[in-house]
Image (tube, rainbow, N blue to C red):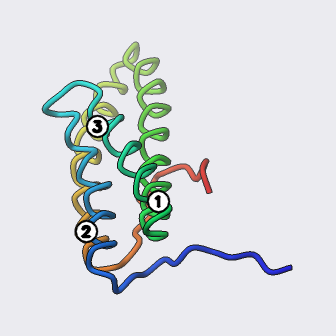
Amino acid sequence: MTEIHPPTQSSDAKANQWAMFVHFSVLCGYLVPLAGLVAPIVLWQIKKDEYPIVDVHGKIVANWLISVFLYSLVCAVLTVVLIGTLGFLILGVLSVVFPIIGGIKANHGEAWPYPLSLKLIS
């Protein structure tokens, strides 16, 4: 029995656009609290069956969101020794840069797993 894997590249412009929206929706959290968590998950769940590539990108974004949460917990503990403050700053920058890069690559039909992201959802 062979296992079917979703594609990691797509030439379908509409699918690529939805994948891009999944990445860019992470940035909604900077405008509306918790929107950066809710919006990508909702978009992913709504479009993953229609466009298999969106499922791939949704998992990438979900893994990043979980990773940032876990890294934030570590940074919170490390603020006692002041290193955590630098960690929060780095996480803030990466949480803007990675979704932008991921969204641009998604729009070109390429899946880009975020560096430093824990692969918890596969």
Front disc: 1 or 3 = 1
Which mark sits nearer the N-terminus, 2 or 1? Answer: 2
Between 115 and 9, the residue placed more toward the observer is 9
| Dots 2, 1 in contact, CB < 8 A | no
Q: Residue at x 34, y 86 (%)?
A: 11
Disc 1 versus disc 3: distance between alpha carbons? 18 Å
Q: Mark 2 = which residue? A: 17
Dot 2 amino acid type: Gln
Identify the disc placed on residue 77: none
Q: As displayed, is residue 86 above or below residue 95?
A: above
Question: Residue 78: x percent and y percent?
Answer: 43, 21
Question: Residue 105: x percent and y percent?
Answer: 29, 73
Q: Mark 1 = which residue? A: 48
> In the visual, does 81 lie left or right of 24?
right
Q: Say which element carries label 3.
A: helix
Q: Mark 3 = which residue? A: 36
Q: What crowding class fits label 1: few (fewer than 14 Cα within 10 Å), some (14-19), or many (20 or more)? A: many
> In the visual, does 32 lie left or right of 80?
left
Dot 1 amino acid type: Lys
> In the visual, does 2 lie left or right of 60?
right
Q: Say which element carries label 2.
A: helix
Dot 3 amino acid type: Gly
Disc 2 versus disc 1: distance between alpha carbons? 13 Å
